[in-house]
Image (spheres, rainbow, N blue to C red):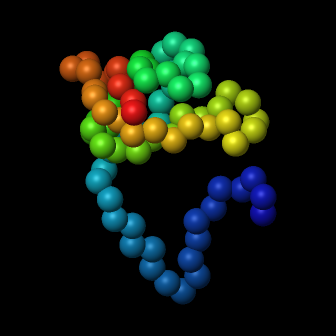
Amino acid sequence: MYGNKVLGVMNGVIDIHGKPRSKTFTLLANSANAGDSLITVMDTVDWQVGELIVIASSDFDMNQAETRYITAVSEDQMTLTLD
């Protein structure tokens, strides 16, 4: 089932834990280059310092994504400083 997004259980229960989030993803407000330490996003986010985020590639190659830690969040919660 490559490409299908499904999470299912038969004769059971799914019990998912975690902090409810206002946004789980958003788009970049401006282009970012590989290794940039400051990004601005389109939506207000409730992400916290120390959390791990993934910046997806604009290409179809999943190996071009970056995993980075948030080191600071602006007051408007739209500009993130990354490690």
* Residue 41 visible at all: no
Left or right of 50? Residue 3 is right
Give the quarter of the figure containing the C terminus: top left
Residue 54: x percent and y percent? 51, 40
Q: Is residue 8 visible from the viewing direction of this image?
A: yes
Residue drawn at 56 percent across, 77 percent down: 9
Residue 38 in percent (x, y) is at 41, 20
Q: Position of residue 33 (x, y in %)?
A: 58, 19
- The mark tally for this picture is 0
Q: Quadrant of the N terminus?
A: bottom right
Relative depth, front residue between 78 and 10: 78
Which residue is farthest bottom? 11
The residue located at (58%, 82%) in the rendering is 10
Whether residue 55 is situated above or below residue 35 in the rendered picture: below
Q: Determine the residue positioned at 70% across, 42% down.
A: 62
Relative side of 36 to 72, left or right: right
Looking at this view, name the residue that lies furthest to the left.
75
Left or right: 52 in relation to 20: right
Which percent across, then down, holds residue 57? Answer: 65, 32
Q: Is residue 68 above or below residue 19?
A: above
- Report the front residue among 49 and 15: 49
| Relative height, residue 47 to residue 42 (above, below) | below
Q: Tell me where residue 69 sits by quadrant.
A: top left
Q: Quadrant of residue 77?
A: top left
